[in-house]
Image (tube, rainbow, N blue to C red):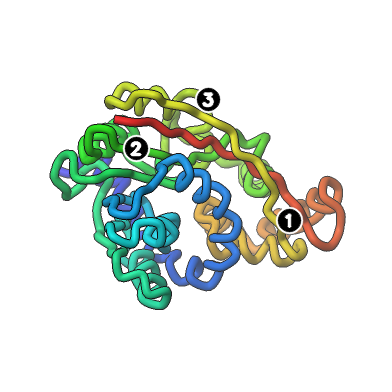
Amino acid sequence: MQTPEDTIREQQRAVWNQFAPGWKKWDDFTMQFLRPAGAAIVNALDLQPADSVLDIATGTGEPGLTMAAFVPNGTVIGTDLSEGMLAIAQEKAQRLGLFNFRTQQASVNELPFEAEQFDAVSCRMGFMFFPSMEGAAREMVRVLKPGGRLATAVWAGPEQNPWISLLMGIINRRLELPAPPPGAPGMFRCAKPGLIAGLLESAGLSDVKETVLSGEVTFDSPDFFWTNMNEIAAPVVHALRQASPEVIQQVKEDTYEQLRARFGTGTLALPYSSLIIQGRK
């Protein structure tokens, strides 16, 4: 019998397979945007040359590919639900000559690995999608060796992330979308300070620390922003599919107006903020 968690996983797998071509097109831009969060994770893990590393929700391969260069005598396995995203990650690994990186399709709530297998576990912007965040935390800790390190990044609140909340706010107002159920997967599901840290502590980690990482993401123009959001931002695409061409045009005009009013014309520097959580088993 299919559970609600199974349904969420199947839906997300379909969505990310659908978005894989768009993410490949925008990969350089997106990976540059997310690089500071990946660098913070790598720094927190204190990798050693022979470490075995698990990168969960690796998508198109990061920060797993970066970590592969830090463990030349070790291995990195990148897992994801989407075969399409993993194909991009494996292609990048081959192009970069990172033969100690491999991919494996897997659900974080049912990791296909032995207990205490990895020296380090990473997860960048994945927790918000997991059907069961508690179950994900337990699985991550289960496969981590005693003394092993875990680090993850999640988005802070919508007020700190206008790069996505500005547009989603306009969409929600124009389409009058109902609020999602409490705790449902979504961009800011993990934003409450201490939430993910608490889950990791309950799962068995110690020395858990949470820090804030903030910066700016630069879009060349409002047109660049609009195109990017409509090709890789799943909540934007999903919402606008329900709208008429007239409403979409209204959303676009509202978006350009707010971008000009808040961030000027020409190149746009939009703030972002994330939480970096790390701990040791």
Give x and y (percent) for residue 113. Answer: 16, 48
Q: Secondary structure at mark 1?
A: helix
Can residue 15 be seen at all in this image of the molecule? Answer: no
Residue under circle 2? 149
The furthest residue to the bottom: 95
What residue is shown at x 44% (from left), y 59% (from top)? Answer: 66
Give x and y (percent) for residue 240. Answer: 57, 56
What residue is shown at x 63% (from left), y 48% (from top)? Answer: 164
Residue 53 vertical placement versus 95 (above, below): above
Residue under circle 1? 250
Residue 25 vertical placement versus 65 (above, below): below
Q: Are marks 3 and 1 in contact (CB under 8 Å)?
A: no
Density class for disc 2 (Cα within 10 Å; few <14, some 14-19, many ≥20) is many
Amino acid type, label 2? Arg
Give x and y (percent) for residue 23. Answer: 49, 66
Q: Which of 72/156 is in front? A: 72
**Residue 220: numbered disc:** none
**Residue 193: numbered disc:** 3
Q: Which of 12/150 is in front? A: 150
Q: Which of 244/189 is in front? A: 189
Mark positioned earlier in the residue sequence (2 or 1): 2
